[in-house]
Image (tube, rainbow, N blue to C red):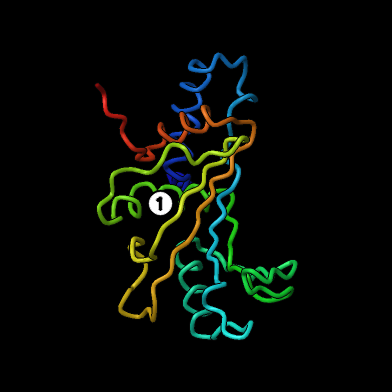
Amino acid sequence: MMVAQTNTPRLKTLYNEEVSTKAISEFGLKNRHQLPVVEKVIVNCGIGRFLENQKLKPEIRDTIYDTLTTITGQRPIMVMARKSVSNFKVREGAPSAIMVTVRGDRMWHFLDRLINLAIPRIKDFRGVSDRSFDGAGSYGMGLTEQAVWPEINMARVNFTHGMNINICFRKSDPARSLFVLKELGMPFVRKEES
C-alpha cells in the first residue's frame, strides 16, 4: 500500500504543532485566530552604489539575480526609484533595488535554511539583534555577504553583496514576534545575567 508523502516544511510543522500552543498559553490568547502569523519574507538588495550613470552593469545585475533566485527559489524583480533625490544621486526611474517576496511553503523552507544554515556561518557571530522589530512585529535583519548561503558557489561570483531580510508578521506585536522567532530557533543575542 502506497502512502502519499507530503513535503511539509519542518518549521511550519513546528509552528503548527508546538509554537502555536506555547504562544496561546504564554500570551493568554482565547483562540488560534489571535496567533501571530508569519505572512511573508522579503529579501532585498540595494543596488544604488553599483550604478554608473544611472545604469546597472549586466554582470552585476545577473550576479544579484542569480543569488536571489538560488536562495529563494523564485525570480526576483527590479525596483525603480519613485522620485529623484539629488543628495543620493538618484533619478526617478533609475534602478534602485532587486527584491523577491517569498510566501507559503517556500517561505518556511527559506526561513529554515536562514536560521539553521546561513546565520551560523556568519563570521564572528554572536547572535542577531532582538531590537530590530517594528511596531507591527515584523523583523528586519541584514547580511553583509552572500557567502553565508551554502548554495552559493563563491568561485563563480564576481563580487560580494549584502541583502536585507524582512520577516513580516500579521496579527502581532514585537513581543509576540520575538517569542515566535525564538521558538522557531532564531539565535538572538543572549542577555548577560548579572
The number of numbered badges drawn on the structure is 1
The amino acid type, in three-letter code, at marker 1 is Leu
In the visual, does 151 lie left or right of 22? left
- Circle 1: is it few (<14), some (14-19), or many (20+) Cα within 10 Å? some
Question: Closest to the observer: 114 or 187?
Answer: 187
Q: Position of residue 48 (x, y in %)?
A: 57, 72
Q: Position of residue 41 (x, y in %)?
A: 55, 50
Q: Quadrant of the C terminus?
A: top left
Residue drawn where x is 60% and y is 23% of the image: 32
Corner quadrant of residue 129? top left
Task: Please say whether residue 45 is visible from this viewpoint.
Answer: yes
Task: Please say whether residue 4 is visible from this viewpoint.
Answer: no
Above or below, comparing residue 126 to residue 55 in the picture: above
**In this figure, which residue is indicated by the disc labeled 1?**
114
Q: Quadrant of the N terminus?
A: top left
Q: Position of residue 89 (x, y in %)?
A: 63, 74
Above or below, comparing residue 55 to residue 33 in the picture: below
Q: Residue furthest front?
A: 87
Residue drawn where x is 75% and y is 68% of the image: 83
In the visual, does 143 lie left or right of 27? left
In the visual, does 110 lie left or right of 34? left
SS for callout 1: helix
Residue drawn where x is 46% and y is 70% of the image: 67
Q: Position of residue 50 (x, y in %)?
A: 52, 77
Residue drawn where x is 55% and y is 71% of the image: 47
